[in-house]
Amino acid sequence: MAQETLFICQPYVFGKKGALKPQPPIAFTSEAQASLRAHRIMNGGSVAGIDVVRQTADPDMGDYDEPVFLERLGTVPQSET
């Protein structure tokens, strides 16, 4: 299969001792869908923060490029870049 572009919402909640704990990621087919869902999730108040990322991948080969952060809402882990 060819490479595809993934748009992913990665929510985080506060775990024990205040540490951020990732929740299951949610995949979308467009940046607009991912952004809209991220804002709805944040407005719902059930998460500490959420990242919206774009990632190019060839899932059949197991090749995933580095994610590109499109939005970072609320409290999210620090970026290493």
Image: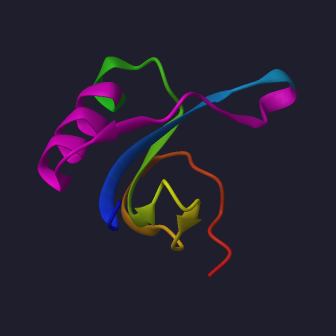
As drawn, 81 above or below 19: below
Residue 40 on the magenta span:
yes
- Image spot of residue 45 (x, y percent): 40, 20
Instruction: Indicate the colouring scheme.
Output: rainbow
Q: Residue at 43% across / 64% down in the picture? A: 57
Taking the image as shown, residue 8 lies to the left or right of residue 28, namely right
**Mark count:** 0
Q: Which quadrant is home to the N terminus?
A: bottom left
Residue at far left of view: 32
Q: Residue at 32% across / 66% down in the picture? A: 2
Residue at far front of view: 1
Residue 29 on the magenta span:
yes
Q: Residue at 76% across / 24% down in the picture? A: 15
Residue at far bottom of view: 81
Magenta segment boundaries in residue numbering: 17-41
Taking the image as shown, residue 70 lies to the left or right of residue 51, namely left
State the image quarter where residue 13 is shown: top right
* Front residue (pair 46, 55): 55
Taking the image as shown, residue 45 lies to the left or right of residue 75, namely left
As drawn, 31 above or below 70: above
Taking the image as shown, residue 21 lies to the left or right of residue 32, namely right
Q: Which quadrant is home to the C terminus?
A: bottom right
Q: Residue at 68% across / 27% down in the picture? A: 14
- Image spot of residue 39 (x, y percent): 25, 37
